[in-house]
Image (cartoon, helix red, strand yellow):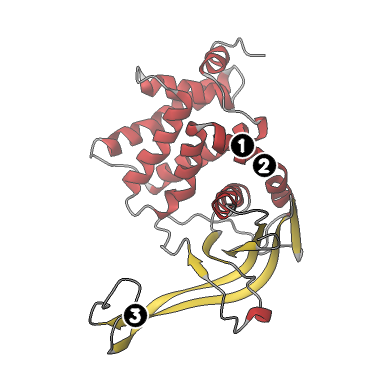
Amino acid sequence: MQNESFFFGLHGLQLPEPQLELGKDVVIRETYASIFAPFMVAFAPPESPGTHHPGPWSAASGGVSFDISAELVIPLKKEGEPAKALQTARVILFLLRLGVNPAITLPVFSNMAFSKENAGAKDQTLHPFEVQGRSFPLAVSESTAGSEALDWVCKYWEITQKLVDSSSEFALASDSIDQGQFIQNTALTLVSLWGALEALFSPSSAELRFRVSALIASFLEPPGTDRKERQKKIAKLYDERSKAAHGRPKHSQQHLLDTFNLLREVLFKIIEQGSVPTSDRLDSMLFGADA
């Protein structure tokens, strides 16, 4: 397995250059492949597990298809690394969505490059990864990824991987914002995003509305009027979370978008600081004692 790699097909990422080096032999490079899977229907179960369904088979309209515009290449340097490679891909995908374009998806990954040189290869295996539609799609207006945003991913992906491994709260927050676009019910999305914020900013359940909104404002804003106004806005967003959590959702699309952006801002700051704030530090920031 010394020379093998996994190739993660990315949809929605247009690179400004042919290849981006992320370090540790991990690269993102431009390519093109159209992945399509038409539906086939069988009408009887297989005789034993792992065998083919008996005929007749019928082709049906429908199916799934994705255009792959770039591939993330992660080397497998030793036995047992496929799971680690997949975890690394998830972290990099999370950062690409967070810092470059939230519309980027990873529909499929492969044991071979998405290249016409591999056309007809009999031992290529494709693994579906993200094939569901986005129910609350987010995107940026630029069609080509900015170099500064891609440099940010290169700089922080290893730090982010350590944060995911070391902090269950950060891992929950990254999963919540990363998967929020795919949840069909927006009330569940709102509750998920706020659950992540609560985990980061209030391990205690006492006075959640004020404590969470005040601590988030203290983390994001210096002492003063801006912090006070930010706390009020965050508290209003929390009210929408409470309605959704208790089965009386009245939130708008803007409330949901504002919550996405709030968690995104928090995660940016945590990643760039390289640590999740402790309860003691948050309390110090709340009362103006943090340096």
Secondary structure type for disc 3: loop
For label 3, the residue is 52
Q: In this view, does 275 lie to the left or right of 151?
A: left
Mark 1 or mark 3: which comes first in sequence? 3
Mark number displayed over residue 162: 1
Screen quadrant of the N terminus = bottom right
Q: In this view, does 138 lie above or below 50?
A: above
Single out the mark in the foreground, 1 or 3.
3
Say what amino acid the circle numbered 2 marks.
Answer: Glu
Identity of the residue drawn at 41% across and 55% down = 182
Tell me where residue 131 sits by quadrant: bottom left
Q: Are marks 3 and 2 in contact (CB under 8 Å)?
A: no
Q: In this view, does 37 lie to the left or right of 92?
A: left
Nearest the viewer among 125 and 90 is 125
Residue 117 location (% of width, % of height): 68, 80
Q: Give how far apart the Cα atoms at labels 1 and 3 are.
A: 43 Å
For label 2, the residue is 158
Mark 3 or mark 2: which comes first in sequence? 3
